[in-house]
Image: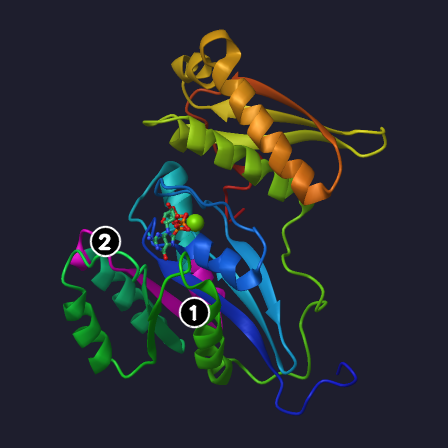
Amino acid sequence: MTSGSPKNYRAGFVGLIGLPNSGKSTLMNSLVGEKVSIVTAKPQTTRRRVLGLVSGEDFQVVFVDAPGVVNAKSGLNMFLAEEARDVISESDVLVAVLNIDEKSPEQLEQILTLVKESGKPWIGLIHKVDLPELHRPQILRDKLSLLNVPVIQGSALTEAEGLKETLLKTLKPLLPEAKGPMYDEELYTLSTTRELCAEIIREKCFETLHQEVPFGLAVKILKFDEESPVIKIHSEILVSKENHRPIVIGAGGAAIKKIGSEARKEIEKLLGEKVYLDLQVQSKLDWQRNRGIMKELGYVLKN
Ligand SMILES: Nc1nc2c(ncn2[C@@H]2O[C@H](COP(=O)(O)OP(=O)(O)OP(=O)(O)O)[C@@H](O)[C@H]2O)c(=O)[nH]1
Ligand SMILES: [Mg+2]
């Protein structure tokens, strides 16, 4: 037991479960107070779970940001589906993130079914309430009110502080009792610096590139050299089709320059030091169907 931990200490893993684009990663960052998970306007941004820690006097929550729930039986999408399911089964408590701008109420119901069937304690979060309501969220509220679970609402974008306070207050009694914190209270994520850098590069690719290109793209850090006066990062952007390579590079190298310069600035902010960032674009045909490459990239759950 950590000396000084209060008697009623609680700690646990809290999975954020929702559809792609429901705002899980935005919520995660606002709860942690740091950018630990990348955010874009495109669905299926988050691919692997990201852990973000919030510690208080008598509690520690490890929030788990999962990929949006999708139905798929092969390739990268199957990994996303499995990863979301795994986060559900490994969490102590779940937050169903239900975004009011979702076009399909049936899909939102699928999230409710998943969290209900998990048998875990959970709360419903009606999210993005700063937006005009699109698709009869009152039906959702009525459904939630019958389920006998705590329901809160808010916007991680426009009222982050208030939402954090309400969410933590609602979550705390649902967390398992614990002798003390599970992780160092100073930590805010369990991602490594390499992982954070690779994700920043991927985010800039998502922002710069369109149509199907970002969805078939992965980022690998080849070398992270901290010995030299300027930190040198060598990274590879993998594309799944040969004709995506010139798109990532852009006319006269314009796209890759933009990705590189935006990623470098953000990595420098993260590391607090000057960085030299080298980006190479490689095509590996249909890497999403190649188990060896998927594994190397961390997109395989079971061996
Ligand atoms: N209006 C509004 N937009 C939001 C809110 N939270 C997130 N967004 C926007 O919704 C989009 C998706 O946000 P993300 O946080 O990446 O969503 P996600 O659920 O993590 O998405 P995936 O990783 O693809 O599953 C981004 O454009 C965000 O800026 C919110 O509270 N209000
Ligand atoms: Mg996300």
Occupied quadrant, residue 231: top right
Where is 297 relative to 279, above or below? below
Number of other residues with Cα within 10 Å of mark 2, as a class: few under 14, some 14 to 19, many 20 or more: many
Ligand 1 within 8 Å of the CB at mark 1: no
* 112 to the left or right of 35: left
Q: Quadrant of the N terminus?
A: bottom right
- Which element carries disc 1, helix, strand or loop? helix
* 185 to the left or right of 88: right
Q: Is residue 94 magenta?
A: yes
Nearest to the eye among marks 2 and 1: give it: 1
Where is 11 relative to 259, above or below? below
Q: Does the magenta stretch include residue 153?
A: no
| Percent of width and height locating residue 153 | 33, 70
Identify the residue under disc 2: 102
Q: Can residue 174 be seen in this view?
A: yes
> Disc 2 and disc 1: Cα gap in Å?
20 Å
Residue type pointed to by label 1: Leu
- Which element carries disc 2, helix, strand or loop? loop
| Percent of width and height locating residue 174 | 47, 82
Residue type pointed to by label 2: Glu
Furthest-top residue in this view: 252
Q: Can residue 292 be seen in this view?
A: no
Magenta range: 86-106
Viewer-nearest residue: 20 or 114: 20
* Label ID, residue 231: none
Furthest-bottom residue in this view: 7
Number of other residues with Cα within 10 Å of mark 1, as a class: few under 14, some 14 to 19, many 20 or more: many
Occupied quadrant, residue 246: top left
| Percent of width and height locating residue 274 | 75, 32
* Label ID, residue 163: 1
Disc 2 or 1, which lies upstream in sequence?
Answer: 2
Residue found at x 63% / y 33%: 265
